[in-house]
Amino acid sequence: MKLEVRLAQWLLAAVFLVNGGVRLWQALHGVPTSNGTLLLSAGEVLLGVLLAAGWQLRAVALFTALVLLVEAALTHPFWKLSGGALASQLVLFMRTMGLIGGLILLSGAGGARRR
C-alpha cells in the first residue's frame, strides 16, 4: 500500500479512536454517560482499531461510512433549523460528509488487490 494511503488510513482511524476513547476515558473518571453513549463509544474505538490495523479494510471503511451517514442524518438535522443553528449544524454535517468521502476513497485505494 502506498505511503499516502497508509497515512490516510491511520488519520481516519485516529478520528474514531480519539472520539470514542475520550468519551470512555471521561466515563471511567466519573463523567455521567448513558449506556447508549458508552456502547457507541466502544464501537467507535473498535472501528478505529480495525481501520488502523487494516483488517478487511474495504468492508470496514464502507461500513464506517454508512454508520457515519446515518449518524449525520440523525444528529445534524440542519434542514429543520434556521439562522445560527442552521449554520453550525450544516458545518458539522458537511465535516462528517468529508470523513465519509475519505472512507470511501480509502475503501477503494486501500482495499484494492494488485494483479
Image (spheres, helix red, strand yellow):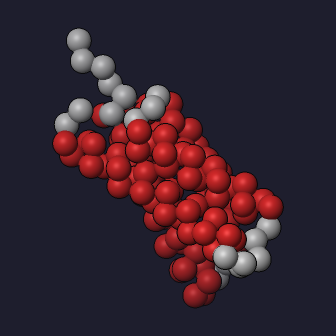
Check the image and name the residue furthest to the bottom.
84
Q: Can residue 23 be seen here? A: no
Q: How many marks?
A: 0
**Identity of the residue drawn at 64% across and 53% down:** 42
Relative side of 85 to 19, left or right = right
Residue at horizontal 45 percent and vertical 32 percent from the top:
55
Quadrant hosting residue 23: bottom right
Asked where in the image residue 83 lies, by quadrant, the reply is bottom right
Q: Position of residue 44 (x, y in %)?
A: 58, 53
Which residue is situated farthest in the top direction here?
Answer: 115
How far from the left and from the top, in percent, is residue 79?
65, 69
Camera-side residue: 106 or 40?
A: 40
Compared with 109, 33 (above or below) is below
Left or right of 114 on screen, residue 44: right
Q: Is residue 45 visible?
A: yes
Residue 51: image x %, image y %?
Answer: 44, 42
What residue is at 69 percent from the left and 71 percent from the top?
27
Which quadrant of the figure contains the N terminus?
top left
Q: Using residue 31 as the reference point, say whether residue 7 is left or right of it.
A: left
